[in-house]
Image (cartoon, grey):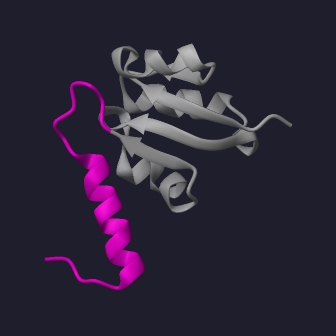
């Protein structure tokens, strides 16, 4: 079984990774991501990198918790969702309280 890394997000941000023979899936919405995740065999996936515009914390947090997904900023991002999620996970892991 071939283990793979996947990138999901807007075309401008992730098409670069296809040059390295990494599987890329273009998505413009959370619904697009849901359809992509239904079609891929997650047992073959090492990690999914997803741009923050198409990441939904309520729907995809299970992938973060199982270390299957990493939220990354896109080229046009200003939301900082990825930073906030990592910050929350560090606080949970260290027992720190939120401010």
Residue 20, relative to residue 86: is it above or below?
above
Q: Quadrant of residue 95?
A: bottom left
Location of residue 88 in the rendering, given as x and y in whole percent from the top left corner: 31, 67
Q: Which residue sits furthest left? A: 99
Residue 61, relative to residue 93: is it above or below?
above
Q: How many marks?
A: 0
Residue 45, relative to residue 18: is it above or below?
below
Residue in the image at 66% along x and 28% along y: 39
Residue 54, relative to residue 83: is it above or below?
above
Drawn side of residue 46 relative to residue 69, left or right: right
Drawn side of residue 5 relative to residue 33, left or right: right
Residue in the image at 21% along x and 25% along y: 76
Q: Quadrant of residue 99?
A: bottom left
Quadrant for the N terminus, please: top right
Q: Which residue sits furthest right? A: 1
Drawn side of residue 40 relative to residue 76, left or right: right
Q: Quadrant of residue 23?
A: top right
Q: Which residue sits furthest front? A: 20
Residue segment shown in magenta: 73-99
**Residue 98 lies within the magenta run:** yes
Residue in the image at 23% along x and 83% along y: 97
Location of residue 20 in the rendering, given as x and y in whole percent from the top left corner: 58, 20
> Along the line of sight, which residue is nearer the eye, 4 or 66?
4
Location of residue 63 in the rendering, given as x and y in whole percent from the top left corner: 53, 52
Location of residue 21 in the rendering, given as x and y in whole percent from the top left corner: 63, 19
């Amino acid at each position: 079984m071939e283990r793979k890394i996947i990138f999901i997000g807007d075309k401008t941000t992730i098409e670069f990774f296809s040059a390295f023979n990494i599987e890329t899936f273009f998505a413009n919405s959370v619904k697009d991501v849901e359809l992509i995740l239904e079609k891929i065999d997650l047992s073959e996936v090492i990690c999914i990198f997803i741009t923050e515009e198409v990441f939904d914390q309520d729907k995809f947090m299970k992938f973060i918790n199982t270390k299957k997904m990493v939220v990354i900023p896109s080229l046009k991002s200003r939301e900082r969702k990825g930073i906030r999620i990592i910050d929350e996970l560090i606080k949970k892991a260290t027992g720190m309280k939120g401010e």
